[in-house]
Amino acid sequence: MAEEYLDVVDENNLVIGREERGIIHRTGQWHRGVHIFLFTPERKLLVQQRSLQQLSPNMLDCSVSEHLKAGESYPSAARRGLWEELGIAQISLKQILQFKMNYGPNDNIISTLYEGTVDREKIIIDSNEVSRIMYYSLPQLEELSARGEASFSRWLLQLLLWYWGKPSDIQIISKQQESK
């Protein structure tokens, strides 16, 4: 399979080149990502458990997390991720936050976080990407984190810390709404 190409960006999110994903992650170049938090009408967050084939296997993750492919926009990557990971084709998303963060060794990403409302009945998970999905309220996730009862991906934990109003490693570029 051909290596996936991503846009390389500077710290201001301006595209300065393209490179293979593996090289970007080995060299620590800035690139782009997208995350989606899907809530039920009762404000339970859809959290996925990453498959064994993914980075951070078996850890809890956002409803959707994706890298942007070279030339792809944030909204397009969000729609692609919804389809690939959860089988969702049509959903209204609201941009909440754009931020930059170090996701791990040599993994520097400028990401956009979106929120949407999910219909549990319309989800079809891709088992290559997702082991299973669960629904938690934000207080339930905070309790799981505080008690160390679940393994969270670094990015999910940092986004949740931001939601909870606690210090996080997220460097906010822009916020689209004041209330969470």
Image (tube, grey):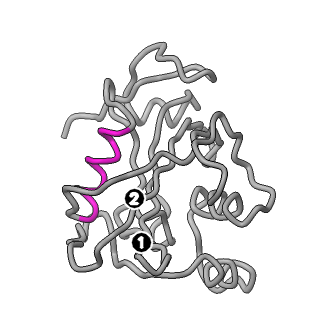
Distance of mark 1 from mark 2, alpha carbons?
8 Å
Q: Which of 113/117 is in front?
A: 117
* Magenta span of residues: 75-86
Residue type for callout 1: Gln
Is 171 above or below relative to 153?
above
Above-or-below relation of 95 to 51: above
Q: Secondary structure at mark 1?
A: strand
Residue shown at 29%/38% (left/top)? Answer: 76
Disc 2 on helix, strand or loop? strand
- Going by the picture, which residue comes out furthest to the right? 167
Q: Residues within 10 Å of mark 2 (few under 14, many from 20)?
A: many
The quadrant of the picture occupied by the C terminus is bottom right
Amino acid type of the residue tagged 2 in the rendering: Val
Q: Residues within 10 Å of mark 1 (few under 14, many from 20)?
A: many
Query: Is the stretch drawn in magenta largely helix, strand or loop?
Result: helix
Q: Position of residue 20 (x, y in %)?
A: 37, 28
Counting from the top left corner in percent of width and height, residue 36 is at: 44, 56
Residue 84 among those drawn in magenta:
yes
The residue singled out by tag 1 in the image is: 48
Q: What percent of the width, then of the height, locates residue 104? A: 62, 48
Disc number for residue 64: 2
Q: Residue at x 21, y 56 (%)?
A: 90
State if disc 2 and disc 1 touch (CB < 8 Å): yes
